[in-house]
Amino acid sequence: MSHHRGSSFQSNDLFPREIDIEVCLKTLKIYQKLEGDVNCVVWDASLVLAKYLETMCQHRADFLSGLKVLELGSGLGVVGLTAATLGAQVTLSDLPETLPLLRLNINENKTKISSMGGYAIAESLIWGDNTSEILKEEFDMVVLADCVYYEEALEPLIETLKSLTNTFNKKPIIYLTQELRDSEIQKQLWESFHEKISEIFYIEQVPEEQQHANYRSSDIILLRLNKK
Ligand SMILES: C[S@@+](CC[C@H](N)C(=O)[O-])C[C@H]1O[C@@H](n2cnc3c(N)ncnc32)[C@H](O)[C@@H]1O
């Protein structure tokens, strides 16, 4: 791979990771960064969510076909790219500085995605920014993995989830995964998030036995949220 124009990484900063989507016999190639901040590697919570979407498609082949899906805090894009390969029209989103690598990953996988009838683009969406054009669109589903991680971003993230579901028409279903970490700060953050979203959403926890047999874990929680 050559140097990617306009971005802040060189080809030797990156290493690929392959992720099989068994249900449609495709393999995603995701570039990760050798060094960097939280958005440089694939987090386990994103694999659990991506594989859950795949499992749902195994039960019902059209589970994602043609659906408009938004991913928040996409990072390297595993969840959104999986949804697109399973036939969804996906907008992946994250902070502006993460977009070059996210777009590289979309580009790397675009032939597989289009061969399955899916579509993927990446846009900036900073949580709590109520002026974002994305919030004017209607989605069938919102997905997010491992985004309850930053104390200062907790309220803005909830604000964005609220805006996305505050429509008169379609109210998207939300699937989220979160790795429950041991530190006191992370435990309190998760408790606080859970308490706040329970005022706005009906929350169902997806039992481990309904998840992918090899990609589930007792310390990664998978929730389905519906606006009250
Ligand atoms: C722990 S990473 C998880 C990434 C990816 N979902 C995964 O599971 O591999 C959290 C992601 O949230 C993004 N993020 C953090 N604060 C944000 C904010 N205020 N607005 C939008 N995205 C944010 C980060 O850039 C990062 O990609």
Image (cartoon, rainbow, N blue to C red):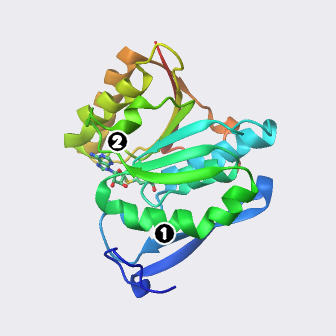
**Total marks in image:** 2
- The kind of residue tagged 1 is Leu
Eye-nearest disc, 2 or 1: 1
Percent of width and height locating residue 205: 54, 28
- Tag 1's secondary structure? helix
**Mark 1 crowdedness (10 Å alpha carbons): few <14, some 14-19, many ≥20:** some
Q: Which mark is residue 104?
A: 1
**Mark 2 crowdedness (10 Å alpha carbons): few <14, some 14-19, many ≥20:** many
Percent of width and height locating residue 133: 36, 37
- Tag 2's secondary structure? loop
Q: Residue at x 29, y 44 (%)?
A: 126
Indicate whether 26 appears above or below 181: below
Percent of width and height locating residue 128: 26, 35
Q: Residue at x 41, y 28 (%)?
A: 164
Q: Residue at x 75, y 58 (%)?
A: 115
Percent of width and height locating residue 152: 19, 41
**Disc 2 vs disc 1: Cβ atoms closer than 8 Å?**
no
- The kind of residue tagged 2 is Val
Q: Residue at x 55, y 39 (%)?
A: 69
Q: Is residue 56 toward the left or the right of residue 5 in the image?
A: right
Q: Which residue is mark 2?
A: 148
Indicate whether 70 appears above or below 137: below
